[in-house]
Amino acid sequence: FPFPSGLSPGSFQQTPKHYGITSPISLALPKEADLALTQKLTETLKPYGVFEEELELQRRILVLGKLNTLVKEWIKEISDIKNLPASLIDTVGGKIFTFGSYRLGVHTKGADIDALCVAPRHVERTDFFSSFYEKLKEQEEVKDLRAVEEAFVPVIKLAFDGIEIDILFARLALQTIPENLDLRDDGLLKNLDIRCIRSLNGCRVTDEILHLVPNIGNFRLTLRTIKLWAKRRNIYSNILGFLGGVSWAMLVARTCQLYPNAAASTLVHKFFLVFSKWEWPNPVLLKQPEDCNLNLPVWDPRVTPSDRYHLMPIITPAYPQQNSTYNVSASTRAVMVEEFKQGLAITDEILQNKAEWSKLFEAPNFFQKYKFFFVIFLCSGYFSARVGLVESKIRILVGNLEKNEFITLAHVNPQSFPGPKEEEFSTMWVIGIVFKKMEGSENLNVDLTFDIQSFTDTVYRQAISSKMFEQEMKISAMHVKRRQLHQLLPNLKRRKHSTESLRQMNDSSLDMSIDSDNSMSVPSPTSMLSSTPFMGPPLGPPKTSTADLSDVPLIPTNPISVVKNSIKLRLSR
């Protein structure tokens, strides 16, 4: 099955083939200076852990080979149980495919692997979650095995010899699975149930991206750069309304199509040039959408009214085409566009030898950027899934805040932080707020009680319906000013003329080794765990805001201890 090939920047030969839906902007070949800048870029990236050692890569290949062998053995066993002819059992096949960052060849140290088990038509999904699950359980190398059968895309999660792997399942309408099977073939989707189509989508999109770029080596180095930059700038999180891995990959792929012969150093600069000036919501497309007459829902604003409201559409190249950025809000788009512009300014300096590549990866002073903040607290008990549940709903709160007539922008920091020390298992998220400037008004009264309460109600209902709720789970939110943040985040020492403590907080690790499409993971400073106790009316209420927190039942027929947030702000201008 396919593995990422070498990680070299690739050869620089002019590409005659036409890529993308438009003609290239430039066919210029790289100059010596471009190649030298590319080499400097590679050296700059190394300390950040974005390249995996060759031994570790070979270990991944070995693990995937073992997993592939297990799949073939399992399918033969199932075929025998279901009385297939002996002649067919030997050729029935079965295969593990990879997708995501590993398949693209841009995975980082310690990243997990997204995999897909493809089986012939006589193997049922119930077999995958029963007999294959049991077969995995028998393997000595397999740890932390768990099945999530009821998920939107059902998955088995495990650690195989220390490497985390997520395995999806797809049953094709084929009698056998050939070794040279190309999942990009749209005909394979015929007569499949929707769960199999969803499972196939990751592989199909990843393979299409690799076939739609003119130089895979240049694409990979550019994508590694952009992913690291996005993580450092706190804009890598699909779940919070920014972009996930596949979306960043498609933006880089489009840049490669427009400059097919450019070196990676040039492509990074052109990436910022193109998307700082892109006229959103015009969609980003890697190829013209195709209709396979399979009656599957595709992204098409001419047909589907809800698609017309997508703010930053980036369309997957494989049928059925979908918008990978439907979570993007007005605020997150504004933040990303501003970051594109800043990236362009920095790469302009780098190309003029006025700055080094390291400047592109400097962490931002998020806490210095805004004057007002919302802090969300989750006291969850020892159940990490609740953290993921709350995080997946924060974009609802951001949407609520954006609709408020007095708020211009709500920017959530993708990095979460440990909560108050006395709450043993608690998490905090911080949202920077920009209020509108009201002409001729000294004071501004803003009531955000409904916005906060609708968010917490949504989270509680979801927790109850998914059986995650327990009595100790509490959510609260409060408004603080910048000068008060140090009471919640002790590393934010108050310094009148220095932001060094802010840099330390944002720059807590150079090793961006966790690779995920859903969230941005930066190790939180451990010293936060010794934070100043915070309970009840915190911070000794500020002059310009009040926070009234009181327990009320969420659902009268099922009494639950819930924190209701009454937040009324009086902002002095």
Image (tube, rainbow, N blue to C red):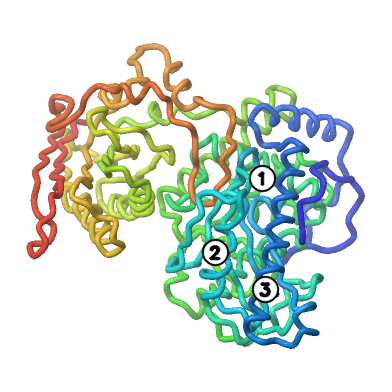
Mark 2 secondary-structure assignment = helix
Residue 75, numbered circle: 3
For marks 2 and 1 on the same chain, the one whose residue lies earlier in the sequence: 1
Q: Residue beneath label 2, please?
A: 134
Between disc 3 and disc 1, the foreground one is 3
Label 1, residues with CA under 10 Å away: few <14, some 14-19, many ≥20:
many
Q: CA distance from mark 2 to mark 3?
A: 13 Å
Image x and y of residue 320, in percent: 59, 75
Residue type at numbered disc 1: His
Between disc 2 and disc 3, the foreground one is 2
Residue type at numbered disc 3: Ile
Q: Are marks 2 and 1 in contact (CB under 8 Å)?
A: no
Residue at (59% x, 82% y) in the render: 192
Q: Residue beneath label 1, please?
A: 107
In this view, 264 is above or below 67: above
In depth, the one of 528 and 93 nearer the eye is 93
Quarter holding the N terminus? bottom right
